[in-house]
Image (spheres, rainbow, N blue to C red):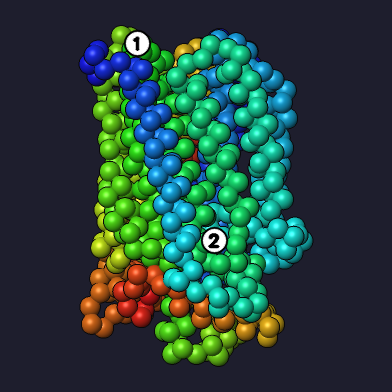
Amino acid sequence: MLKYQSQAVAKPYFIAAIGLFVAQILFGLVMGLQYVMGDFLFPEIPFNVARMVHTNLLIVWLLFGFMGASYFLVPEESERELYSPKLALLLFWVFLVAGALTIVGYLAVPYATLAEITGNDLLPTMGREFLEQPTITKIGIVIVVLGFIFNIGMTVLSGRKTVVSIVLLTGLVGLAVFFLFSFYNPVNLVLDKYFWWWVVHLWVEGVWELILGAILAFVLIKVTGVDREIIEKWLYVIIAMTLVTGVIGTGHHYFYIGTPEYWLWLGSIFSALEPIPFFMMTLFAFNMVNRRRKDHPNQAAVLWALGTAVTAFIGAGVWGFLHTLAPVNYYTHGTQITAAHGHLAFYGAYVMIVLTIISYAMPLLRNQGPAATAKAQKMEKLAFWLMTLSMAAITLLLTGAGVMQVMTQRMGDAPLTFMAAQDNIAIFYWLREVAGVVFLVGLITYVASFFTSDKVKTAA
Amino acid sequence: MSDRFTKSMARNIYLGGGVFAFLLFLGLTVDTMERLPERDHRENITPAVALGKKVWEDNNCIGCHTLLGEGAYFAPELGNVYTRLGNDKEAIKIMIQSRPVEGVPGRRSMPQFNLSDEELEGIAEFLKWTSEINTNNWPPNIQG
């Protein structure tokens, strides 16, 4: 069923991504409970460890997803086999083992011990949000990503060059380049923070959006049959707006960390425009589906494609805009408002795009034809709604918690202490945990949807 | 999109816009770097402050706390903790030292990190230095 046999290397990447996704959610539930039962699993798994595992697993499984997506779509776009399927498989195991060892390290020993035994003092890069990995793990990530880009690059450059594959490759190179800033850790905290955002912001509000756009464009070409020329034109305009708004938009992180005052204006203005590319992505997805030349049998993939566009716009665009203007951010900076935005933005833009390509590719990778059985698709769609609506609920509840936190702790003549304000909003955290359990049910349904089709086959 | 708007026009907007954005960002970064010394008071970064930042990182403090609003939202903001505790380094040290190993039943509690006197002095100096950064008057009040 695959057009090119080497596309098959995408399969282990997608399976690993889903497995790590499940683990990520379990640790999310642990953290959610720790918000209201402060001593839960203390001191064995303190909050900071659970959070590190939660966020690092997210990053790693999304990277697995991006790599799987690239190995799947690049041969088809380039109209040739992958440069080296063996290298892709080797890097898969290297990345998986390195990732697993890092997570075990987080859980098995105190973080300071991990820093010591991995030689952090030789090149200190640890202990910064999202970049908690030991330096040797970071070096491992660089090696894996470089090998991956070499493999993809050789395939793209020696095959048919399409806008989709070139934009994808540009995004991946950007991902690698900006990750190098994780090795720069000056003793001056302000400088540290300034360039830390070159990894974090320029990834998720910059080059990752190129990867997102390329994957979405690929899936839309496949499931709608709309002329490639039209889709590629949209892709260019969307990523143009991404870079024009998002790069200077980094300034919305430079309001209150010691950087000059002009960033209050630049960050506000440019990041206020950041919803535009996401809105265009929504228009794009619906337009293409409406103009479809065929009804693709994989309707679950179509649902994910439309869902990622809409949810990314709401989560990244609308929820980002809510607190991006400097006078608003003055009160909301570093509160649950940020957590609310982070959850829906990551879910909508990056979780859902990876699930989109998995949804499209998996039936082909499993020799099921262009689509899974009707029963499996029905289950996958149920999982889509359970996960998406519960994540929307999590976002609304954290927004409620955040608004209360801002009002009691950041405003008024007699502001509460941090912990007093937290105690006041415990009900929001309890409800968020309930929504989190629903999300897990959705995720279990999602995983189960891969196993239904086999039963149907044997029954038939 | 209309046919008069061609793919090559779209590509040029992407390339031109992208290059322009990055060049402008680089220019602003150069300017920011020139202005930072008077805002971050780097002349006050002593070996103790440097050690404090290392202690901060080695114990993953950012995994629970925010520092200048960035980090996790599980525990109090520490960018202004020095002033919140009455401009008192000793109060910071006592807070860190006094954490019960087994935590507090039903409550959030900071782990006991068993820091040495030198490390405690470092973290206190680091948080004092951080509290003196010009943050455009953030946070809005002493509670952080």
For residue A280, the mark is none
The reply to whether residue A406 is in sight is: yes
Lateral position of residue A322 relative to residue A453, left or right: left
Quadrant of the snapshot with the N terminus of chain A = top right
- Label 2 resides on the chain identified as A
- Mark 1 burial class by Cα count in 10 Å: few <14, some 14-19, many 20+: few
The chain under label 1 reads A
Q: Is residue A113 above or below residue A243?
A: below
The quarter of the displayed image where residue A427 is located: bottom left
Q: State the residue at coordinates (53%, 66%).
A: A189
What percent of the width, then of the height, locates residue A9? Answer: 64, 23
For disc 2, the marked residue is A192
User: Where residue A207 sits in the image (x, y, percent)?
Assistant: 47, 37
Q: Identify the residue under disc 1.
A: A227
Disc 2, SS:
helix
Tag count in the figure? 2
In this view of the protein, which residue sits in the foreground, A297 or B115?
B115
Name the kind of residue labelled 1 in the image.
Asp
Residue A313 vertical placement versus A45 (above, below): above
- Does A281 sit above or below residue B62? above
Disc 1 on helix, strand or loop? loop
